[in-house]
């Protein structure tokens, strides 16, 4: 994982904790995919994909029309879904409610600030 990606996941964990989630695992990996973050809030699991992009001061989403979530390709969604199923099966989780989410982060490398967007309840 590159430096920006790791930084984005760290920011995502802080964000989730501030919003009442408990981070259970990071970087759960299998040959066919990876879960960036597995978190829990109340009695519901949340599988979180983190997409981070960097820009220079003054950069914004409208500048090029490119957003971090644009990195969530159909192939990535397929792998994400498969590794969620694997996680649930390996952990013996049958009855627990769960959801998938995306955290899109835009990091301004010059100012060291980040904009975070939390997109909950993804339809896979």
Image (tube, rainbow, N blue to C red):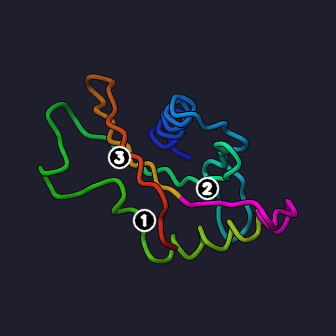
> Circle 2 is placed at which residue position?
47
Residue range (magenta)? 88-100
Circle nearer the N terminus (2, 3): 2
Instruction: Judge depth for marks 3 and 1 and give the one in front.
Output: 1
Residue at the far top in the pictured view = 111
Reading the image, the residue beneath label 3 is 53
- Look at 72% across and 57% down and name the residue there: 29
Q: CA distance from mark 3 to mark 1?
A: 12 Å
Q: What residue do we see at 34% from left, 53% from top?
A: 68
Q: Quadrant of residue 17?
A: top right
Label 3: which secondary element:
strand
**Residue 39 sits in which quadrant?**
top right
Image coords of residue 43 (percent x, y):
71, 48
Q: Residue visible at 65% across and 60% down?
A: 98
| Circle nearer the N terminus (3, 1) | 3
25 lies above or below 74: above
Tell me where residue 79 appears, x and y as whole percent.
Answer: 60, 72
Where is residue 89? Give x, y as percent: 82, 69
Q: Nearer the viewer, mark 2 or mark 3?
A: 2
Q: Residues within 10 Å of mark 1 (few under 14, many from 20)?
A: some
Q: Is residue 17 above or below residue 80?
A: above
Q: Is residue 76 magenta?
A: no
Residue at mark 1: 72
């Amino acid at each position: 994982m590159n430096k920006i990606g790791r930084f984005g996941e760290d920011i995502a964990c802080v964000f989730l904790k501030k919003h009442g989630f408990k981070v259970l695992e990071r970087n759960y990996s299998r040959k066919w995919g990876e879960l960036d973050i597995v978190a829990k809030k109340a009695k519901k699991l949340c599988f979180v994909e983190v997409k981070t992009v960097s820009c220079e001061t003054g950069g914004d989403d409208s500048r090029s029309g490119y957003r971090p979530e644009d990195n969530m390709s159909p192939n990535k969604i397929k792998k994400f879904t498969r590794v969620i199923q694997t996680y649930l099966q390996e952990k013996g989780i049958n009855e627990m409610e769960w959801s998938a989410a995306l955290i899109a982060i835009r990091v301004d490398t010059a100012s060291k600030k980040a904009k975070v967007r939390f997109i909950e309840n993804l339809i896979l």
